[in-house]
Amino acid sequence: MSSASSPLLDFRDVSRSFTVRQGVLGRVRGEVRAVDGVSLSVRRGETLGLVGESGCGKSTLARMAVRLLPPTGGEILFDGESVLPGVSGRNDTWYSRRLQMIFQDPFSSLNPRLRIGTSIAEPLMAIGAPSAERQERVGEILRRVGLQPGHAGRYPHEFSGGQRQRVAIARALVTRPELVVCDEAVSALDASVQAQVLNLLKEVQADFGLTYFFISHDLSVVGYMSDRVAVMYLGRIVEQADRNTLFGSAAHPYTKALLAAAPVHDPAKRHIRAFLPGELPSPFSPPAGCAFHPRCPQAMPRCREEAPELREIAPDHLARCHLYG
């Protein structure tokens, strides 16, 4: 087991590629590298936010973290152990007890045919908890997320969107995990309900000593929740810093554009899309050189030819940009 000073979740040069097929015969169209050489650490007790446009690879990274997808390159360590089945010697129960995920859509992440008490208890069944313990824990966690134990007998369609996401949070917390991966956990909710759910996530983090890997396309939400923030663009991390540094002294042009687009400390305000020329490039044919150069207002000739490295430009502040070296 790792020491208290080591990362709880550690991505080391992680990549994930997908083969894309088309047509009736399923001919190979090409390969998409959804995640491209990501190195990122989530420290114990913190919230690390990951922000970027839809399609940049955030959710792929999240699914690899919780063992729903294997990486095609690099390694991912949870508490010093590889998350790949059969590599670490740890069984599925060890991971299921300590590592959980809250998904984006509370309408599709809950089985409509199961009562919510059964859905919440599923992770406990997976780790072999006895029936009496399951029933007790389900009641406890329902109370903690603002619902009632009597709600356990109801079906998902009997709840509002915000209540369903509280059920999803309860399911993620019922095993008393150390790390929770939140993948766009509030993006399907309206603004007022978002604020309530974000505050609940903060409260249970303090109560249970949780670590969060918090993923969102909305920088205002990430800023509200996170201690440190990483910015992702087309499969790569382009900037990483603590929250105050990132919001006060952003280095990468992409981060600056995101910051210019939305208020950063009020999750109840609606997100305003950043103005950037053009669209996110196709992952089938990413640009040569810096992937951001076709949209960058500060692009130089070098940017079109040479991909920048992620380098430290100040203590604990990393940027992938030729403007800084």
Image: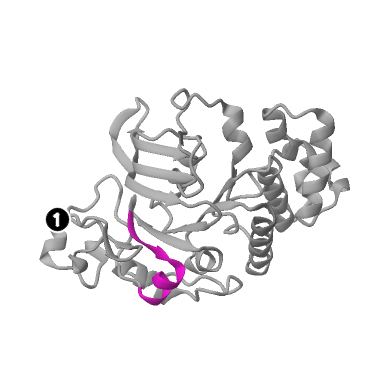
Find residue 270 and report its horizontal and vertical position in percent. 56, 72
Residue 158 visible to an observer of this rendering: no
Split into 4 quadrants, where in the image is the C terminus?
bottom left
**Residue 308 in view, yes or no:** yes
Q: Position of residue 76 (x, y in %)?
A: 41, 38
Q: Is residue 248 magenta?
A: yes
Q: Based on the displayed image, in which of its 4 quarters is residue 197 positioned?
A: bottom right
Q: Which amino acid type is marked by label 1?
A: Glu
At numbered mark 1, what does the secondary structure look like: helix, strand or loop?
Answer: loop
The residue indicated by pointer 1 is 306
**Quadrant assignment, res 26:** top left
Left or right? Give the position of 45 relative to 25. Answer: right
Give the left or right position of residue 32, taking residue 194 as reference: left
Residue at image coords 64%, 56%: 205
Location of residue 221 with respect to 4 vertically, above or below: below
What's the residue at 46%, 27% (across, down)?
A: 88
Pick the front one: 56 or 211: 211
Is residue 64 one of those drawn in magenta? no
> Is residue 153 depicted above or below 242 in this figure?
above
Disc 1: CA contacts within 10 A as few (<14), some (14-19) or many (>=20): few
The image shows residue 8 at horizontal and vertical percentages of 49, 45
Report the magenta residues as a range. 237-249
Left or right of 315 in this view: 184? right
Residue 16 horizontal/vertical position (percent): 36, 39
Depth order, front residue of 52/210: 210
- Relative to 296, is 208 above or below? above
